[in-house]
Image: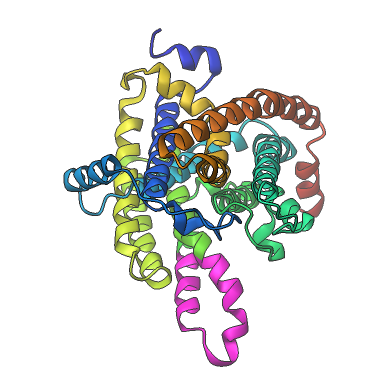
């Protein structure tokens, strides 16, 4: 198959597909490698009883040690993969804004992200309950309202605990969608000063969070949410800057200056908010930016790999199901058989099956359905009329 085939058949830029597949592969890989080294440390996080005596296979220790000696000391697959995902979102969301009315944008974003997130969250919750029931524990570790808050991606707003911690990245995605929606009313996504001011605002919030003590302690929770968003929204702004370069809105020099300024502010934001691990996270944000720029400049010269294309297609449900859901399956199997290899094999079998089930029955139908519904709003352009009426 020609490397340009995905572009022609699916209307997707291959370099973005490749970047998405690479990010997903690295995140799944490092999560499971870390898990296999010490799965017993996650029992409370995944709402399961303690794992029986477990010793990681020597092959896993040996492999992890060998890889640690080869890769750069500050390279962390999970931080790099997440940064790459966020840059991709920052690049494609402005494109989505230009495809129709604002109502069109809102509906397509909801259809793209919410049904899959809802399905995966419910599946993960059911698997967690199943694992507990097998041991005779009939007490649910979370309420129905918590499941719904997680599934609707409003957990951080209403203050519910996590069902699966992977949902935090989607919450940041939703916040970015809202920001882009607001910016679209004055084409702010195309203005360099707007992008820089937003990044600067998140930096100020991170500083405020650091020094907010005494009578202002009550505000720390809200500042923490905003600052946490800021540390990972800035890579999205970098993606937005690169979109403007790719679309011909900004020159090379302008884009380079904005990206450098964003990277500097991201570094400072991380230092104030994250602290000790800020340098590691920043290095991987920087590395992800460089890799994305190279892929962008290569364009259709990026070699086509069928595996990466298919992985990118299912990356969304796979990302949501590979963690807590897969870990619980591992716990269940290992408690019965005490065999790491079998537990790993069955876990990946279940994850793969559930990923393709959600992809085919939820993700694939919901995206075009959202587009069809959105088209019906294009003529009405509700938000456009609202803007003209208030002018």
Residue found at the far left of this picture: 69
Marks counted in the figure total 0
At x 55%, y 92%, the residue is 214
Residue at the image point whose x is 81% and y is 41% from the top: 382
Residue 146 horizontal/vertical position (percent): 73, 57
- Is 274 or 320 nearer to us in this picture? 320
Residue 33: % across, % down? 37, 44
Query: How far from the left and from the top, in percent, is residue 246?
Result: 41, 33
Is 216 placed left or right of 348 in the picture?
Answer: right
Work out which residue is located at the far top of the displayed protein and give it: 1
Q: Can residue 8 be seen in this view?
A: yes
- 58 to 195, vertically: above or below: above
What is the magenta range? Answer: 200-227
Q: Is the magenta stretch mostly helix, strand or loop?
A: helix
Rendered image quadrant of residue 339: top left
Residue 20 picture quarter: top left
Would residue 361 be counted in the magenta stretch? no
Identity of the residue drawn at 17% across and 43% down: 70
Whether residue 368 is situated above or below residue 62 in the rendered picture: above
Q: State left or right for residue 370 relative to residue 230.
A: right
Residue positioned most to the bottom: 214
Q: Nearer the viewer, residue 391 or 229?
A: 229
Of the 4 image quadrants, the one containing the N terminus is top left
The answer to whether residue 247 of the structure is visible from this angle is no
Residue that appears at 48% across and 28% down: 312
Query: In the rendered view, does 191 fall on the left or right side of 149?
Result: left
């Amino acid at each position: 198959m020609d490397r340009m085939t995905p572009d022609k058949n699916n209307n997707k830029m291959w370099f973005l597909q490749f970047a998405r597949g690479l990010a997903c592969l690295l995140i799944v890989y490092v999560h499971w490698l870390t898990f296999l080294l010490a799965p017993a440390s996650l029992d409370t996080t995944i709402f399961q009883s303690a794992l029986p005596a477990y010793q990681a296979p020597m092959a896993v220790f040996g492999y992890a040690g060998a890889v640690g000696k080869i890769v750069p000391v500050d390279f962390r697959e999970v931080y790099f993969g997440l940064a790459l995902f966020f840059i991709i979102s920052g690049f494609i969301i402005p494109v989505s804004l230009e495809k129709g009315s604002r109502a069109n944008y809102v509906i397509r974003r909801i259809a793209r992200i919410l049904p899959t997130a809802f399905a995966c969250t419910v599946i993960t919750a059911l698997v967690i309950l199943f694992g507990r029931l097998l041991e005779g524990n009939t007490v649910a570790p979370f309420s129905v309202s918590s499941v719904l808050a997680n599934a609707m991606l409003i957990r951080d707003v209403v203050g519910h605990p996590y069902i699966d911690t992977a949902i935090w990245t989607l919450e940041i995605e939703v916040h970015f969608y809202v920001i882009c929606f607001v910016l679209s009313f004055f084409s702010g996504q195309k203005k360099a000063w707007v992008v820089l001011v937003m990044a600067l605002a998140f930096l100020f919030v991170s500083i405020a969070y650091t020094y907010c003590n005494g009578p202002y302690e009550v505000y720390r929770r809200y500042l923490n949410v905003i600052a946490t968003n800021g540390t990972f929204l800035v890579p999205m702004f970098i993606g937005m800057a690169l979109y403007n370069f790719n679309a011909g809105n900004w020159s090379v020099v302008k884009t380079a200056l904005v990206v450098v300024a964003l990277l500097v502010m991201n570094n400072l934001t991380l230092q104030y908010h994250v602290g000790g691990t800020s340098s590691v996270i920043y290095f991987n944000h920087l590395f992800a930016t460089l890799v994305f720029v190279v892929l962008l400049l290569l364009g259709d010269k990026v070699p086509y790999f069928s595996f990466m294309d298919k992985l990118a297609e299912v990356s969304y449900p796979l990302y949501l199901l590979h963690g807590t859901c897969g870990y619980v399956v591992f716990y269940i199997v290992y408690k019965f058989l005490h065999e790491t290899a079998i537990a790993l094999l069955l876990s990946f079998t279940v994850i793969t099956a559930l990923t393709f089930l959600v992809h085919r029955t939820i993700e694939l139908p919901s995206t075009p359905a959202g587009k069809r519904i959105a088209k019906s709003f294009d003529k009405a352009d509700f938000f456009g009329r609202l803007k003209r009426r208030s002018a």
